[in-house]
Amino acid sequence: MSAPVVVIGAGLSGLYAASQLCAAGRKVILVEARARLGGRILAGNIPELGASCDLGPTWYWPQWNPRVSALLRKAGIATFAQYQTGDDLIELRDRGLIQQKKDPRYANDSYRVRGGMTALLHYLSDSLHGVDIKLNTKLISMRLQEGDGIDLTLEQNGVCLHLHASEVISTIPPRLLAETVNADPPWPIETLQSWKRTPTWMAPHAKFVACYEKPFWRDAGLSGDAMSEIGPLSEIHDASDTAYALFGFVGFSSAQRSRLGEKQLSDMALKQLGRLFGEAALTPIASHLKDWTTDAWTATPLDAAALRSHPVYQRPDLPQAWRRNLFLAGAEFAPTHGGFLEGALEAAENALLSCQ
Ligand SMILES: Cc1cc2nc3c(=O)[nH]c(=O)nc-3n(C[C@H](O)[C@H](O)[C@H](O)COP(=O)(O)OP(=O)(O)OC[C@H]3O[C@@H](n4cnc5c(N)ncnc54)[C@H](O)[C@@H]3O)c2cc1C
């Protein structure tokens, strides 16, 4: 019997690649280090409301994201425009709180997914008929058997596991790949250096979401959009979907966040929401804080440093010997939409083209 294609990583890129291979009749094993599917796509549950909120990606941009748009259409998943009706708030160190009309020039064209980004995960995972999904299983090393695929060493719940693959599609972000996976023959030093220089998009960030019974900010004529020089949240938006919610990116550095700890940081974030949007913001039904920098399956210590701009991402440049059997996908190997959900699909498509 022919050896399977092994897909490493069950984020959007890996799930999409596995679903396409499965539809093409290939035998597929999907390996994921975490105990769940989704990678950077993650929902925080709000059991009190039978709802959930996005702790990872929130938006897609229909005019720039043809692959995401097509996948959502194919899945029949409803979408809606980011709520932007009403005034914005700006909190300045020297001038305090300013309320201002939204400048239409800066209105953004972001769209949201009804039920959250995890709707995409449910759709893709439902299509993985016959795919052997191995959760809690991390790739440790790859050994190229020239002319005969790749031998993989994995660790599943602390137990060593060996697999033989005809081809491997890895969706591990470049930095993690360089720092955590051994290769035989070893990666050239220039390849390792270039992967280590490639930041994992949004890995330096932390996101805070607070869910409420009522959209009191909308009732007060506010959009929910706010910028703050004081923090801890530097950028805040309306995150309402199945529940009313506000979310913010934490502006404090990862070192400051770890010094404060989750409880103190969450208390400070709520106090800030109260300062900006009024007393009702102080008593959410539920709140979630997700610090991606401390998540070992997304970030390496190199990702603790904040990014000043969106990095330039490139196609993978693998040593010749590996090119017939190993294909690198994942959002950070997408040359056009690197780092984004669209990039996760773009890189998976590129890998699939080479793999088939
Ligand atoms: C807070 C935040 C906000 C964001 N906002 C947006 C947004 O609004 N719009 C947008 O387009 N994008 C956004 N992004 C980026 C978006 O989430 C990513 O582009 C996308 O999810 C990447 O998918 P991926 O499959 O390439 O990578 P990942 O989701 O990182 O998947 C990689 C998978 O590999 C697994 N893995 C790692 N190492 C191993 C190993 N050794 N063995 C086995 N498995 C391994 C990981 O556990 C993970 O599941 C955001 C990201 C974050 C964190």
Image (cartoon, rainbow, N blue to C red):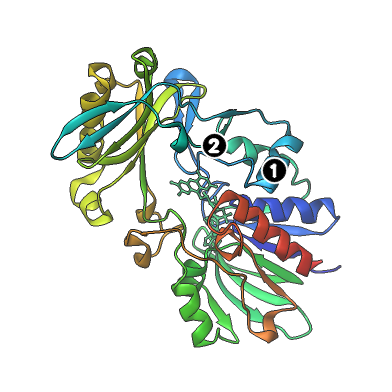
Mark nearer the viewer, 1 or 2:
2
Q: Amino acid at mark 1?
A: Leu
Secondary structure beneath label 1: helix
Mark 2 highlights which residue? 109
Mark 1 highlights which residue? 124
- The image quadrant where one finds the C terminus is bottom right
Q: Position of residue 217 (x, y in %)?
A: 35, 19
- Mark 1 and 2 residues: CB-CB less than 8 Å, in contact? no
Q: Earlier in the sequence, mark 1 or mark 2?
A: 2
Secondary structure beneath label 2: loop
Q: Position of residue 91 (x, y in %)?
A: 23, 35
Residue 39, compared with residue 123, is above or below; it is: below
Residue 226, compared with residue 143, is above or below; it is: above
Who's the residue at 22% across and 33% down the image?
Answer: 267
Q: Position of residue 103 (x, y in %)?
A: 41, 32
Q: Amino acid at mark 2?
A: Asp
Circle 1 residues within 10 Å: few <14, some 14–19, many ≥20: many
